[in-house]
Each structure stands twice: as C-alpha cells, then as structure tokens.
Amino acid sequence: MLQALMNILSSCLKPFGQHNSDRVDSVNGNANGNGNNNNSCLVREGKDGLLWFRDLGKYGSGEFSMAVVQANQILEDQSQIESGPFGTFVGVYDGHGGPEAARYVCDHLYRHFQAVAAETQRNVTRDTIERAVQLTEEGFTAHVSELWSTQPNIATVGSCCLIGVIYQQTLFVANIGDSRVVLGKKVGNTGVTAAIQLSKEHNANLEEVRQELRELHPNDPQIVILRHGVWRVKGIIQVSRAIGDVYMKHAQYNREPINAKFRLPEPMNMPILTANPSIISQPLHPNDSFLIFASDGLWEHLSNQKAVDIVHSHPRVGSAKRLIKAALQEAAKKREMRYSDLKKIDTKVRRHFHDDITVIVLFLNHDLISRGTVQDPPLSIRSDLERL
C-alpha cells in the first residue's frame, strides 16, 4: 500500500520536460464532466509523434483540453485560447494552400479583437468580432501586396476562421469557412447529452451555399462546378468564405506569376470569395456542458453526436486528444488499415489519409460564468507543432 502511494506521488512530482511534457497543471476531471473527482493530479502538455496535446488546463470559465495532429508537410492548422479581461476567446484557423494565412490570423486576430473591445470600454458585441475580422483581412491583404514581387503565390494562401467568445454569460460564435463548433447540452435528468451545432458553414458541397453563390453571381454559370463528386467554387476551392485567397477577391492578383491552376480565365468583376463571418450569440445556460471547436478534419470522420458522446462518456483529461484519435481510427478503417500503421505514415503522405485536425474542448463552469470571473494572470496558449 505504501509503495503504491509512493508511486502516485512520484508520478505527480516528476520534473517538467519528462515524457514529452513541457508543462503540467493541477486539475480535476471525471467521466460525467462535473469536475468533482480528482482522477489526475498533474496533466501533460507535449508531443506524441505528429500529435501535440494539452490534456487539461484552466481558463476563465472552466477547463479546456486541446490537441492538433499534423498531416500536411507543413502544419496548416493554427489555434489559440486567450482568457482575460475581455472574456475568453477561442480561435481555430484551418489554412489551405500553405500555413501563412492561418499563422497571420493567429498572430493578429486576437490583437485586433482586444483593440476594438478596448475602444468600446471592454464591451464585446457582434460588431467587435466583425471589426476584428475585417482588420485582419485587410492586414493580410496588405501583407500579400508587400510580398507580391518576391512571393507571389502567397496570394493563393487562405484560412478558414472559427471564433468563440464567452463574455458576461453570453457565447458568441463566428465562422468563416467549414470549421465547426458543437455544443454538448444536458437533456433534463436523462443522463443524455445532445449535440447542437452552433456554427454555419460555408462549403460549396452544401446546397444552401451553392444557392447563395448563384444569387451573388447570377451572370456566372460556372460559379460552382462539380468535379469528381465534389462541388468547388470556380472548380478550384470548396469554401466560399475565407481570410486570404486574395487572388479570388482582387483582380490585380489573378495573374502571372501565380500558378496557372489558380488563375481564373475570365475577368473578375467582383470578389468570388468573401471574409464575412456568420455570427450567432446566445446566453449560456446551466445545462450547457461543453463546447467542441474543431477544424473540418475532425468532422470528416466523426458526426456531431459521436464527438459529443466521446467527450461526455470519458474523463475530461485528454478529451481533445481522444477525439483526434477516434477520428484517425475512423480514417484508418476507411482505408482498411490499422490505426497503428496510420501513425507510422509521415507528413505529406499522411495527407492522403486525413487532414490536419485541430480540436479544442471547453468545459463550462457556470459558477465562474455567472460570477463574471476575470482570469488573472491571463491565459494565452497556442497549439502549433511547428513552433514548439
């Protein structure tokens, strides 16, 4: 008995950096997500091959779990959690064509959000988010202009952008592209947690998105094209909204020397893509248990309800990592291979089996939310394999 106790204490007191761990935190977590059972005294942050994870940490309104797995040769997903005087800000940025746009968004969007909120005496509204997105889009367009003569293909790089803000018992969700946030909501006293999708997606595979594009471009019969069973805007890109992709927004970049496969053959009279976010806001209720923010790489393999069931039925510790592993197991199964074999496949080749996947799970503590607690010191964390 004494030896078992010593083993537990030894595990809890290991120095930083052991077992791929960079930081550790004291946490509580249990299978039903209410945080009453102490089942882990220290929780790791670290790497496992192409997987980065933060098993559990604390933010202003509760606890979080965070993970990302790389598939592209260079990681194109970026994400962040910021918690402080402006509430809690979550961002998931799914890049395409390269990592530059997603990295730019991760470096600048929250700064713009802070600046805009400060101008309005720290009052966060839908306009705060819209303005922050607009400033980020304008900044990246200016960045492309500066690099055009030396790095013209940066004009073809873009990023989806999923934002969540918890401020004074209100949840704001803004989305550009096809990342997704799903709410896990308790159904009375049934023990069931329902999955409720909160974000609106902008992907040409959705009929409503194709209809929107046709209405915006009534004189362009080729605004959406079906190729190999996939609908694409101008036959090139699946998302209809993104930050960046300036070659599909500004005619001066739709020309040589960018790669011919991106160039549109006809003149551009109006932007093909936009960076306008779809935004919702709603009060948080005591039966709102947790939020799953993830890039589309997760949702390609897991349904909303499956993801919620995984989080609900397991301890909080490692929730984000667990969701990614479930998605990878599904990806392996589709290719009739073992998950252990998939893990051995290197970057770039791995992209043929699954996308980069980012997951952030926020567990909601309604006592903290109702008190309007401000986190001090502020939390600022990013999941970026390339920068660890």
Image: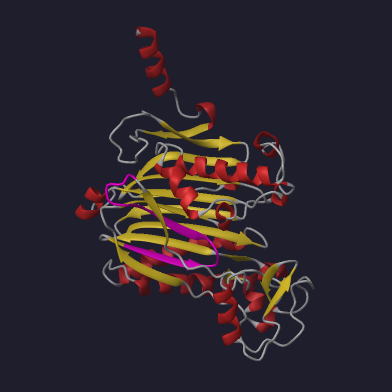
Q: Can residue 91 be found in the magenta stretch?
A: no
On-image quarter of the C terminus: top right
Residue placed most toward the observer, 341 or 186: 186
Percent x, y of residue 283 = 28, 63
Q: In the displayed image of the protein, which residue is found farthest to the left? A: 371
Q: In the displayed image of the protein, which residue is found farthest to the right? A: 260
Q: Is residue 381 something that shows in the picture?
A: no
Q: How is the image coloured?
A: secondary structure
On-image quarter of the N terminus: top left
Percent x, y of residue 168 = 25, 61
Q: At 68% across and 86% down in the image, what residue appears? A: 268
| Quadrant position of residue 155 | bottom right
Position of residue 233 in the picture relative to residue 122 (left or right): right
Residue placed most toward the observer, 146 or 155: 155
Q: Is residue 219 something that shows in the picture?
A: yes
> Which residues make up the magenta segment?
171-191
Above or below 287: residue 32 = above
Residue placed most toward the observer, 70 or 244: 70
